[in-house]
Amino acid sequence: MKKVAIIVGHSDKSRGASNAKTGETEWNYNNNIARKIHGKLLAKKVEPVIIYRTNGYSALPYEINRQNPSLIISLHCNAFDSSASGCEMLYYHSSKASKSFATILQDKVNKVLGNKNRGIKPKHSEDRGGHILKSTNAPCVITEPFFIDNDSELKNAEEKEAALVNAYVEAIVEAVRV
């Protein structure tokens, strides 16, 4: 059985981006999504493990690698100026397997949400998120499916939550079978 690490971006103490109107945080939103992905992956005969950042960001790749996953998905949401929009996936620039997983995720997630397609984005070690993308042993993608500070994108993601979870699960299953 293939093992997949599901990383809940940020932490309970540092909750990431938020929506000014609803108070929803990146960490809270993705913690909920991670639990739902976990349950559905078990039914697909994929071994999911949810990993939280407990010992700081720099230690996170070690914590992930210790689990020896075949694939890593790090759940996040974008934020900028409350009007920016779109879906994108981030991967380490020299990892063909991560690029492939990012492409699968982008296709499935963006079809569900119907957001502006911002595409897949290669990252380097010095870029934001680059440390985890470079320092993990398995293919790793950081998801940015929508802008949480954009009221209409958050509402859309909340309304399509079940379909979003299914899109993540389908992408993971497809990627681990490749």
Image (tube, rainbow, N blue to C red):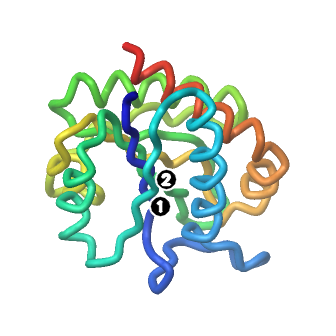
Q: What residue appears at the point 30 percent right and 33 percent down from the top-left corner?
A: 70
- Outermost residue, top direction? 178
Query: Residue beneath label 2, please?
Result: 75
Foreground of the two, 10 or 42: 42
Locate residue 55 relative to residue 143 in the image: left or right.
left
Indicate the amino acid at tag 2.
Answer: Leu
- Outermost residue, bottom direction? 13
Q: Is residue 152 above or below residue 105?
A: below
Q: Which mark, residue 8?
A: 1
Label whose residue precedes the other's in the sequence (1 or 2): 1
**Pointer 1 with pointer 2, Cβ within 8 A:** yes
Q: Which secondary structure, mark 2?
A: strand
Foreground of the two, 25 or 46: 46
Indicate the amino acid at tag 1.
Answer: Val
Locate residue 101 relative to residue 97 in the image: left or right.
right
Q: Is residue 90 above or below residue 35?
A: above
Q: What residue appears at the point 69 percent right and 61 percent down from the top-left corner?
A: 150
Locate residue 97 relative to residue 161 in the image: left or right.
left
**Dot 1 crowding, Cα within 10 Å, few <14, some 14–19, many 20+:** many
